[in-house]
Amino acid sequence: ELKDGRKVECCEDHLWTVAKESHGTTVECTMSTKEMYEKGVIRVKNSVTSGLHHQSKYWLPRVMPMESEEVQQPIDPWLLGYLIGNGSLSMRPRICFCTTDAYVLDRIRHTIPNEIHDSGNNLLYYIHQPAELRYWIEYLKLDVKSHEKHIPQQYKCGSLKQRTEILRGLMDSDGTCAKNGTASYSTVSKQLAEDVQDVARTLGFSVTISLD
């Protein structure tokens, strides 16, 4: 089992290309499952700041993003990602969203020009005359409450650019990035959390899910 929860079933003769520390540098080598276990997969290190702790001897190199063909998507993937995160999609017939980010507002206005109505509080915005958008929201079964949100299948298996864009939209809504570069996404929907994990992994990221 990998650190991010993924599991691999293999025999002892399966060959792995792994990275490891050697004389202060990181090198790649190919080893069998049996060979790694015989040499041990965990080392104990003693740090001045954290004391004794366990560390993996080997780790898998980061995989390249999965390439695939572009697919037909009725709603711009970035816009859909943002609306899944910060949109109210179950309140018929209106579709509204919240933002205080000028970049987000400008991008939505660029994507669906002349359709954004300011509610007057500089936070809540309505999409004016959303009939076509409402049709596709319902077609994709996204007219649901927060705990039922998800990423439609055709957006999970799009091209590299399409998958990147829907993840960007989601991150622009409910995502954060720490100073060390670690990104996180928050949602009350178990299915959406798993969908974000799936999409991010196809882009080459290592992703775990945790409950607060």
Image (cartoon, rainbow, N blue to C red):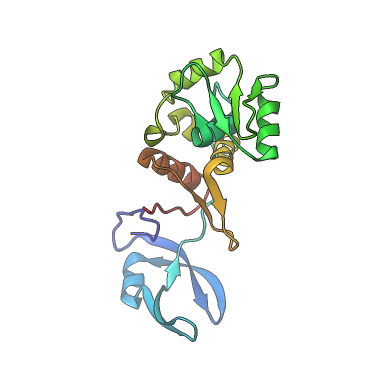
Task: Return the residue found at the far front.
Answer: 121
Rendered residue at 44%/23% (across/down): 140
Rendered residue at 56%/24% (across/down): 75
Classify the position of the C terminus by image quarter: bottom left
Q: Is residue 146 left or right of residue 86?
A: left
Q: Is residue 151 left or right of residue 7?
A: right
Q: Position of residue 199 (x, y in %)?
A: 48, 41
The answer to whether residue 175 of the structure is visible from this angle is yes
Rendered residue at 55%/18% (across/down): 133
Give 193 or 160, whichever is nearer the viewer: 193
Query: Residue 107's image quarter?
Result: top right
Q: How many labels sit on residues?
A: 0
Query: Residue 16's image quarter?
Result: bottom left
Q: Is residue 152 above or below residue 203?
A: above
Give 144 or 42, whichever is nearer the viewer: 144
The answer to whether residue 158 of the structure is visible from this angle is no
Q: Is residue 138 above or below residue 62?
A: above
Give 171 or 98, whichever is nearer the viewer: 98
Give 75 or 15, whichever is nearer the viewer: 75
Q: Position of residue 195 (x, y in %)?
A: 42, 40
Classify the position of the N terminus by image quarter: bottom left
Q: Is residue 212 above or below residue 84?
A: below
Query: Residue 178's image quarter?
Result: bottom right
Q: Position of residue 51 (x, y in %)?
A: 43, 84
